[in-house]
Image (cartoon, rainbow, N blue to C red):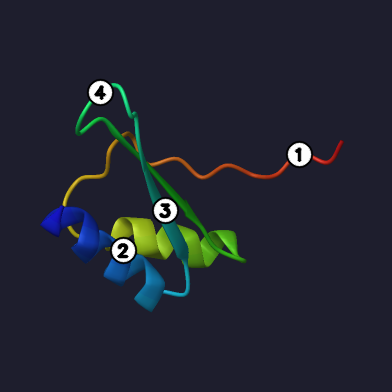
């Protein structure tokens, strides 16, 4: 949890939004979700984030439907 708290503080300080979800049936199985208003801001925050994330770093773009 300390690692996640540190990552949350980092992303919030970098003008990003950060959420962590846990599978209720599988303790400590976390998924992190981070977003920002600008892809460059998000890329910089990911590159300088403390510790590894819960998966490979990817930046997704919203698809207009």
Dot in front, 1 or 4 = 4
| As drawn, 38 above or below 25 | below
Question: Local crowd at mark 3 within 10 Å, few (<14), some, or many (≥20)?
Answer: few
Q: State the residue position of label 1.
A: 63
Report the mark closest to the observer, 1 or 3: 3
Q: Mark 1 falls on what kind of element?
A: loop
Residue 13 horizontal side relative to residue 28, left or right: right
Nearest to the eye among marks 4 and 2: give it: 4
Q: Earlier in the sequence, mark 1 or mark 4?
A: 4
Q: Residue at x 25, y 23 (%)?
A: 26
State the CA–CA distance, disc 2 to disc 3: 8 Å
What separation in Å lies between label 4 and label 2 (alpha carbons)? 22 Å
Report, in whole angstroms, how far the alpha carbon at label 1 lies from the one at label 3.
Answer: 21 Å
Give the residue pinned by disc 4.
Answer: 26
Q: Nearer the viewer, mark 3 or mark 4?
A: 4
**Viewer can see residue 43:** yes
| First in sequence: mark 3 vs mark 4 | 3
């Amino acid at each position: 949890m300390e690692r996640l708290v540190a990552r949350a503080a980092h992303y919030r300080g970098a003008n990003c939004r950060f959420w962590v979800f846990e599978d209720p049936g599988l303790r400590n199985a976390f998924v992190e979700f981070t977003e920002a208003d600008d892809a460059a801001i998000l890329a910089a925050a990911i590159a300088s984030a403390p510790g590894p994330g819960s998966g490979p770093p990817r930046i997704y773009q919203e698809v207009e439907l």
